[in-house]
Amino acid sequence: MKFNAINLVQLVHVATLSACLSLCACTSSTHLTQAASLGLAINSTQMETVLDQPGELELETINSADWRVDLSGLLNLEHPKAIAAGLRNREEPIQIFAHVLHHPKFGYFLIDTGVSEKVVNDPEAAGISWLMRHGMHLEKMTLHRSTANIIQSLPQALSGVWLTHLHIDHIIGMPDIAANVPVYAGPHETEESYWLNVFVRSTTDRLLENKSPLQVWQFKPDTANRFEGVIDIFGDGSAFALHVPGHTAGSIAYVLRTKHGAVLLTGDTSHTRWGWDNGVEPGDFTRQHPNNLASLDKLKALVARHPAMQVRLGHQF
C-alpha cells in the first residue's frame, strides 16, 4: 500500500488520538461501593436442582420506553451467522425495561430502572451530559411509563434495585429512586478502565449522585464450573444472581422462580430476540466480545437444560 503525505498526517492524527484516549482511560464510576450483605454464594448445581419447580415470586416486566438505536451496537454484524443472514446496520426498535419483583417476605424490588420522566423532559437537569444527550439520541425515545409512576403504583416502599449493569440506559430511572433504597451491582462494574468512560463517567456519577453506596454482589467461584459465580439472593432458593461478564465486567443475569415457573433475565448479555435465537452476542455496545459470547452460550445451555424456563432479553420482547 502506498502512502502520500495526507495519508501519513491522517495516520498520525489517528494514532495520537488513540494514544490520548488510552492514556485518559478511566473507570466507569467514582460512586462509592461496599460489599452486599444480601445473598449467599452457592454453586450452579444447587441452583439448578430447584429451577423446574415453581416458586412464590411475582414478576412483571414493564416497557418503560421505546427507543431506536443502531443494530451494529445490538448485534455483532461480523459474526458468521449475521453475515450469512445478510444483516446490515440499520435503526432497530428496542425497549427499555423495568422488572418489578415481589417476594412475599422481603417486598418489592426493581431489576434495572426504566426511564425517569425527568430524563426525557430535562435531561441536562437530570444529569445527562451534553455529549451523552446528543450521542444517545434521546429524541428517538418514547416514554410509556416512568420509573416514578411504577414505584408509586406499588403497595409498599421499594426494598431495593438490582442492576444488570451500569450502562446509562439501565440507570436512567435513578432520579426517581429514593436515596435510601439499596442498589446492587456486579463485581468490578465500577472499576474496569476503558477509554469510552472518559465521555460517560460524569453522567453515570450524576445519575448515582446522593444515592447510597452500590452494594456489590459477593460471588465465589462456581464449583460446578458453569458460571463465574452464583448467588442465592434471599437464601431461600427463590432468586439467583449469575455473574456473566463480557458486556461489562460486572454484568449480571437473574434467574427468578415465579408462581408460573422460572424466568431468566439475560440483561445485555443478549439485547435482541434474533441474537438470542441465533447465539450471536451484542456488537459495538459490548465491552469484550469473546467473554460476552461465552456468557451467552452458558445462559443458552442453562435454558436448554431447563426448557420450560422463560427468557426475557435485555431490550426486546
Image (cartoon, helix red, strand yellow):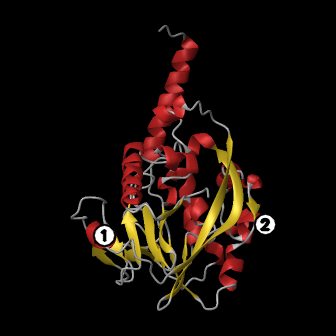
In the drawing, does residue 212 fall left or right of residue 149?
left
Q: Residues within 10 Å of mark 1 (few under 14, many from 20)?
A: many
Residue 54's quadrant in the figure? bottom left
Q: Residue 53 location, x and y as percent?
A: 40, 76
The residue at 44%/57% (across/down) is 27
Q: Residue 116 location, x and y as percent?
A: 69, 70
Q: Which disc number belongs to residue 219?
A: 1
26 or 315, which is in the foreground?
Answer: 315
Helix, strand or loop at disc 1? loop
317 or 252, which is in the foreground?
Answer: 317
In the drawing, does residue 248 fall left or right of residue 230?
right
Q: Which residue is mark 2?
A: 121
- Identity of the amino acid at label 1? Phe
Number of residue marks: 2
Residue 187's quadrant in the figure? bottom left
- Identity of the amino acid at label 2? Asn
Establish if 164 lies above or below 297: below
58 or 23, which is in the foreground?
Answer: 58
Residue 220's quadrant in the figure? bottom left
In the drawing, does residue 222 fall left or right of residue 165?
left
Name the mark nearer the viewer: 1 or 2.
1
Q: Is residue 43 visible?
A: no
The residue at 35%/75% (across/down) is 50
Q: Residue 164 location, x and y as percent?
A: 48, 65
Q: Residue 305 location, x and y as percent?
A: 36, 59
Q: Which disc number belongs to residue 189?
A: none
The residue at 39%/83% (across/down) is 234
Q: Is residue 296 visible?
A: yes
| 3D distance between C-alphas at marks 1 and 2 | 39 Å
Helix, strand or loop at disc 2? helix
Q: Of callouts 1 and 2, which one flags the residue occurring earlier in the amino acid sequence?
A: 2
